[in-house]
Amino acid sequence: IKNSIIKNMSSTAIYAQGAKIKASNTILSNCGEYLTMLSIGGDYQFIHCTMYNSYNSSERVTPSVWLQNYYIDIYGNTQLRGLSAYFGNTIIYGNIDNELMFVKNENTKFNVKFENCLVKQNNYSSFSEYFTNCIYNIEPMLNAPDRMDYSLLSGSPAIDNGLLSLGKYYPIDRNGNSRILDNKPDIGALEYKVK
């Protein structure tokens, strides 16, 4: 999934079970439940994405991102499904306190990493092994998310805080702007551009 926008779903933008997904320069927004429900294992990469969930058509109680490595079958047996999920230079923010949910069985793979991401997660310290160089619980300062404008405002904490190696691998943002002119890529799908 590249340079895409998935928005305005009553339930979920991406619902994947044991899938393999690579997403870059993609915006997921405004869903009644999850932006990404990654259950029953799988292999996932979300790089330079913006996931912003401010759905207000009803009360949202589910997190934007759900990660799970098993399920219970119809006979009540636990079925293990290894999970690998990498989020790099990605914004995960919304209007509830914890926008991430980790549902983990210790008996199978749960390789999850958030690197140079901006996340809204009040209990992040309980899951510190999954986070590297992330920014927590600071408003990303998007231009007008209520009007589906997810560009960064001047002073956004996402500006210049992305991992350079990912910026070099994805040197052009969703709007065609360079991420690497200053060797300081921004977090999210859209590079800040002085107007």
Image (cartoon, grey):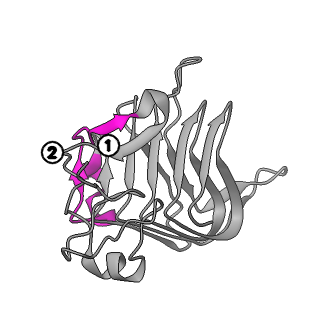
Q: Determine which residue is flagged by label 1.
A: 121
First in sequence, mark 2 or 1: give its number.
1
Where 6 sits versus 149, above or below? below
Kind of residue sitting beneath label 1: Gln
Q: Secondary structure at mark 1?
A: loop
Residue drawn 19% across and 49% down? Answer: 157
Question: Disc 2 marks which residue?
Answer: 155
Which contiguous range is marked in magenta? 124-144
Q: Residues within 10 Å of mark 2 (few under 14, many from 20)?
A: few
> Which quarter shows the N terminus?
bottom right
Report if residue 114 lies within the magenta region: no
Q: Residue 83: x, y in percent?
A: 57, 69
Q: Is 39 left, or right, of 120 in this rendering?
A: right
| Image depth: mark 2 or mark 1 in front | 2
Within the magenta stretch, is there residue 143? yes
Residue 6 % position (x, y): 62, 47
